[in-house]
Image: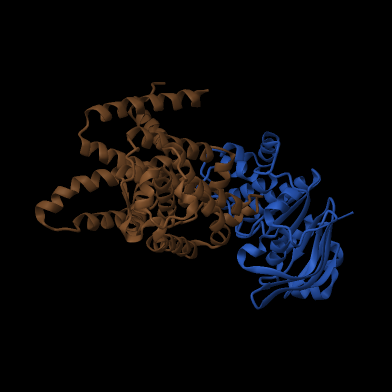
Amino acid sequence: MRDAKRVLLTALVGAAFLLLIDNFASGYHKYLIELMGIYAILTVSLGLTNGFTDVFSLGHVGFMAVGAYTAALLTFPLEKRPNYFPELPEILKGAYLPYPAALIVGGLLAAAIAFVIGFPVLRLRGHYLAVATLGFMAVVYSLLLNLEPITRGALGISGIPEYTNIWWIYLWLGLTIYVTWRIVDSYHGRAMVAIREDSIAAQSLGIDTFRYRLMAFVIGAFFAGVAGGLYAHLITLIDPRAFSFVLTFNVIIMLIVGGMYTISGAWLGAVLFTVLMQALKPVEESTGLYGLVELIFSALLVAIMIYKPRGILEEELPAVVRRWLKAGEKPERS
Amino acid sequence: MTLLDVKELFVNYGPLVAVQGISFQVRKGQVVSLLGSNGAGKTTTLRAISGTITLVGGKVTGGSISFDGQEITKVPPHRRVRMGISLVPEGRKIFHRLTVYENLVVGGYTSKDLEDRLEFVYQLFPILKERRNQIAGSLSGGEQQMLAIARGLMSNPKLLLLDEPSLGLAPRVVDVLYDAISKINEEGTTVLVVEQHVKKALTHSHYIYVIQTGRIIASGEPKEVLSMDMVKAYLG
């Protein structure tokens, strides 16, 4: 009951905030906040695997790409398809879905792929797993480049209907956070934390580590797929380069800097990244030192790894705020 | 009645043969000790019984393990916990960053009566109740071992496997632990303990197996084993 009230309150405050942005922010700032929301969906869902079950996946952007292309194809205007995709396979010629359904199908396809590749990949550990998931990302990238009848290769798909707005993005971010929170804050969440802390000990206590890792991987991939669909219908143009190493590592940086062991840390990382990126752009332009932003981010990542290896937020935000409030209270007199 | 029956067990780590055809039984309701020096294959044997051997790169290459009448050699470790086997691993392996309480709750992952189990282990180790909100990594060595045993008991096992519970602990703490082990046994849990601490094992076990370089070299009740010259020479 208390949880339900809290969720409702957060949703209301969030909605009021979005209403303000939607009506008063400039187009550019609104776009930044939209992008920030998509990044946050990516980091929170990636946190489920990389943070909570200790599966250091680098393939998240691959799942995002699957969702982006799937959703984009499904909502692409039917009448334009024969000219735009002359070699489109027969079954895709008439496959049309409304936007919300297309997002979900994109997510489901990403999740299905995660399920299939999860069986071999999640048997690996540590670096081997990271390399295998990076390999998956590279495979997706080269498929996007070479499956020209469907993806138009390097040209990419343009003219995707602009369905995504701030409300869709933050609705999905809310859902991502809610689902992640329900998992983490449960019997299953404790099992996942045990796996992260010591997988051998967890297994010797009766926890099926593989099942949990697979579950986290599949759920994370679903939300990455949805984020891809949102992204495609926001930018309206997707090409393989949008889903390459650069975004992969940016998402990882956001997650590590924010704190991958907490949900708050994950989305905070996305917020910080977007804000800093924009704040530093003028510095880069005025000094003419292009690449400065990347340099600063790399330095930040190194500094965080040295001084705060668990990220900025080691605890969930409500717990941190509660402690601050307590520290402000005057000690009781006895 | 035999609860655990190990027959002609062979375990390899890659090309290295760690256990070479050992056979032994653990009867229901007893405390049984496997004694032996470093590298004798004691820990490996426990890992084979709990199934965690595959997680550390080992493999059962021959023989069989049956528990409660069922062949379990191919059963994955997490399922063996549900069947009633619980391992308290060497080096404790508690979750250092979680609280005492959280450690116990994770230990009760397969348990349906969590509150009862908590009550039971808190009674056994009152210090854990006092420190339930403390981070486990901040406990003393002895308390960490108590926590590891308590966590292993949370699943309400039929067979508790203890891997060197006395390692690195002060004699007084070892006494407390062994008293607790006796109590656990009186409550109906069968215990298989691996030890280098011969004296404690002798006074608290019903039956003893002595293991050397992957083979059983002697077995019997504590008094019998102690009287064997060969064992005296080996165990000192």
Residue B236 visible at all? no
Instruction: Give residue A38's quadrant in the image.
Output: top left
Most foreground residue, B49 or A32: A32
Q: Nearer the viewer, residue B151 or A53?
A: A53
State the blue chain. Answer: B
Residue A114: x and y in percent read 52, 53
- Camera-side residue of B65 and A146: A146
Q: How is the image coloured?
A: by chain
Above or below B196: residue B96: above
The residue drawn where x is 64% and y is 75% is B14
Which quadrant: the N terminus of chain B?
bottom right
Q: Along the horizontal axis of the image, is A87 left or right of A298?
A: right
Q: Quadrant of the C terminus of chain B?
A: bottom right
Residue B202 vertical position relative to residue A18 in the rendered view, above or below: below
Tell me if B190 is positioned left or right of B90 in this view: right
Query: Which residue reaches farthest right?
Result: B1
Taking the spot 48% from the left edge, 40% from the top edge, the residue there is A180
- For residue B192, say whether it is visible: yes
Question: Can you give x and y, in whole percent of width and height, for residue A291 in the image?
Answer: 20, 58
Vertical order, A86 against A26 (above or below): below
Rendered brown, the chain in question is: A
Question: Which residue is more in the foreground, B26 or B65?
Answer: B65
Residue A252: image x %, image y %?
A: 37, 53
Residue at point 72%, 47% (across, down): B180
- The number of numbered discs placed on residues in the rendered structure image is 0
The reply, left or right, for residue A213 in relation to residue B210 is left
Q: What residue occupies the far bottom of the structure in this picture? A: B15
- The image shows residue A79 at horizontal and vertical percentages of 37, 44
Q: Is residue A321 above or below residue A48?
A: above
Within the image, what quadrant is residue B76 found in? Answer: bottom right
